Structure formats: C-alpha cells, structure tokens
Image (tube, grey):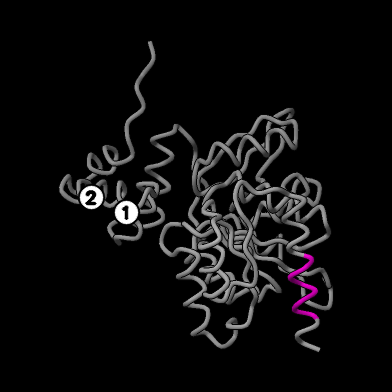
Amino acid sequence: MVVARKFLGEILVEAGIISAKTLERAIERQRATKKRLGIVLEEMGVISEEELADALAQQFGFKTVKGLVNYAFSEELLSLVPKAMARSKLVFPLRQKDNQLAVAITDPDPETLDILAEDTGLQIVPVLTTRQEIQAVIDKHYPLEDSAADQRVKILVVDDTPAVASLIEETLVGEGYQVVVAHDGLQGLRLAIDEKPSLIICDCVMPRMDGYGLKSTMKAVPAIADIPIILLTSQSSREDEQKALSSGFLDFVPKPVDPVRLVSRVKRALELMKKFRK
C-alpha cells in the first residue's frame, strides 16, 4: 500500500504553525511568484527556518541535523562535494558509508542531488537542516579564498533556472574562472556586495528582482556600481539588444546559451574592462 505524501502546507496547518487562512494567502503569492511554498512562507515571516526544515523533513521522510559546525569532517569526505557546488547550492557532505553519501541540504532540489549522484557515483541520502546551520559549516570548511591566495577572475552568475546556471558555471570553471552562483536578482545583489566579482552574467527575467532591477540597484551602491554585467535573455531582437546596451549592460547574450559564444563574450568583456581601467 502506497501512502500519499502530505503537502507542506497541510503539515504546517496540522502542526498549528500557520493557519489555513495564512496558507491560502501564501499559495496565492506562490502562484504569482512561482517560488517554492517554503520560501514564500519564510518571506512572509510566518515560519522560522527550524520549523520549515522540520516540516520538509516530515513531508519527504528525511532526517534532520543540527550543530553541524561543531563536528569534524575529513578532507576526503569534503572533496566529494566541490566548493562551488557547496557554496552555490548549499549542500554539505555529512558521511559516506559503502555506496551512500549523506548530505545536508536546506531544500530537496532533485536536480542538484541528481548531479551530485552522477558526479560521485554514490547514492545520495538527503538530510534537512536550516540555512543558518549549513551556511556556517560551509563557511568553516569551504572558506572563500583571500585575493592573494586565488588570483582567478571571479564571475557571478545570476540565473533562476538551475540547468542554465549549472551549464554556465561548468563552462566558466572549465575556462579557469572562479564562479559564484545566485538564483534570483536579490541573492545576486547580496553576492555582488559580498564577493565583488570582476564580471556578472545575469538573466533578464527572474523572481524577486529581474536583470534590469539588479542593474539599476547596483548603480546606487558605489562599491559595486562599476561591475560590468552581461545580460542573458530569450528576447534577442535588435530592439531588445539596444534596450540592454542603452540601460548600461556591457554586452548581450541570447538564450539558449551557447557555451562557445558565452566564453567569447566573457573574454571580450574582461579585455574591455582591462583597457578601460588602464
């Protein structure tokens, strides 16, 4: 007999964490924004990270973990999850036994877990935790390099489609660049401030803040106002290209993304900025 999995909202209502009316409002907002329900509820301020992790664990039948930063992890184990994936996808390796790899996650994203399974050849066992917990342990074991220790050009990729972001990340890492990934414009803005990348590759249409909104907001922040941005968009008419360039984007790359064209545009952009700063 197969037991139907309960919906996240149903679990939260039954637990008395949110009301049925609050759930209705969250679902309406979810339909408008296309975000996951848990993210919507967090943004509404009606559930905590711990409550969301516990509810997701109940929904998917996963275990939860806390206090990660207090445990020791071997270099061999840490090497199973690349730093770029750990930091951009919020995935952390907990334990390998036989052909299984337990990983801490904040969101059961099937695509990320499938990529990790393919890369490691192991069966991935997800364990839920909070964003605060996983960010702390990632910062401890996958620290960002000092500029003197890592001279690679850093590029921030901002795209809400995981497959597209992964393609761009893999392409650029293969070319020797250091890549940081954000999945919406607001997260991209935060990473631009924190990471100070040499170049940003940004999708045009995204949740929370689109590419034009990101560009406009960055202009108002002196520390990141001059970072060049390449715009990605499926709207590739001459009018769209002119709008992008007149809005201050350094270049314009149409979707679907062609890796060869992308690398060419990135190298061209970096060369232009190098000449401009001389």
Left or right: residue 197 versus residue 173 is left
Residue that appears at 75% across and 44% down: 80
Residue range highlighted in magenta = 267-274
Q: Nearer the viewer, residue 178 or 60?
A: 178
The quarter of the picture where the N terminus appears is top left
Q: Amino acid at mark 2?
A: Ile
* Location of residue 41 by image quarter: bottom left
Q: Do labels 2 and 1 touch, CB within 8 Å?
A: yes
Q: Position of residue 189 (x, y in %)?
A: 52, 71
Residue that appears at 81% across and 52% down: 174
Counting residues from the start of the chain, the first of labels 2 and 1 encountered is 2
Q: Which mark is residue 41?
A: 1
Q: How many marks?
A: 2
Q: Nearer the viewer, residue 75 or 196?
A: 196
In the orientation shown, which residue stands out farthest toward the top? 1
The residue carrying pointer 1 sits among few (fewer than 14), some (14 to 19) or many (20 or more) residues within 10 Å by Cα, namely many
Residue that appears at 65% across and 76% down: 196
Q: Which mark is residue 18?
A: 2
Q: Position of residue 219 (x, y in %)?
A: 52, 82
Q: Position of residue 62 (x, y in %)?
A: 48, 35
